[in-house]
Image (tube, grey):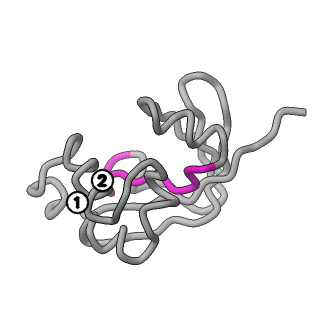
Amino acid sequence: MKLIDFNLQEPDKTHLLEGEKTIECRLNKWKFEQASDGDICILHSGEQFKIIRKYLFPSFQELFDQLGFRKIVPYANSNEEGVLLCYRFYTPDEEQKYGVVGIELEKIEEK
């Protein structure tokens, strides 16, 4: 089991912490390429999430078409809007080079 640190900007962080966002999407490179089901993701603010399932796709459009925007960006109005939000962080060239990953997360409650 690996520990993977990551950061989220608002409003994604709040939606993840409140359980409205259950899938984080990124380029399939570096630590997210190495991530596996069962690994633990730790937000920079300390909250921990277990990786339930890792999904691989060649594009953000295919990821959104298969998994739906409500789980990834619950504040979006459509899959297309979700894809455009991803392009604020990543270019189509990066998307084509690395592919994308959807990481289904479940919050680990503090004891």
Crowding at dot 2, Cα within 10 Å, few <14 / some 14-19 / many 20+, comes out as many
CA gap, disc 2 and disc 1: 6 Å
Return the residue found at the far right. 111
Q: What residue sits 15% from the left and 64% below the top?
A: 96
Residue 26 located left or right of residue 13: left
**Marking on residue 70:** none
Sooner in the amino-acid sequence: mark 2 or mark 1: 2
Return the residue found at the far bottom. 66
Residue 51: percent from left, percent from top: 61, 56
The foreground one among 27 and 76 is 76
Tag 2 secondary structure: strand
**Position of 73 relative to 109 (above/below):** below
Crowding at dot 1, Cα within 10 Å, few <14 / some 14-19 / many 20+, comes out as some
Q: What residue sits 15% from the left and 61% below the top?
A: 97
Residue labelled with disc 1: 98
**Position of 35 relative to 67 (above/below):** above
Q: What residue sits 90% from the left and 33% below the top?
A: 111
Q: Quadrant of residue 77?
A: bottom left
Q: What residue sits 46% from the left and 71% below the top?
A: 67
Tag 1 secondary structure: helix
Residue labelled with disc 2: 27
CB contact under 8 Å: marks 2 and 1: yes
Q: Which residues are magenta?
A: 20-30
Query: Is residue 83 located in the magenta-colored stretch of the structure?
Result: no
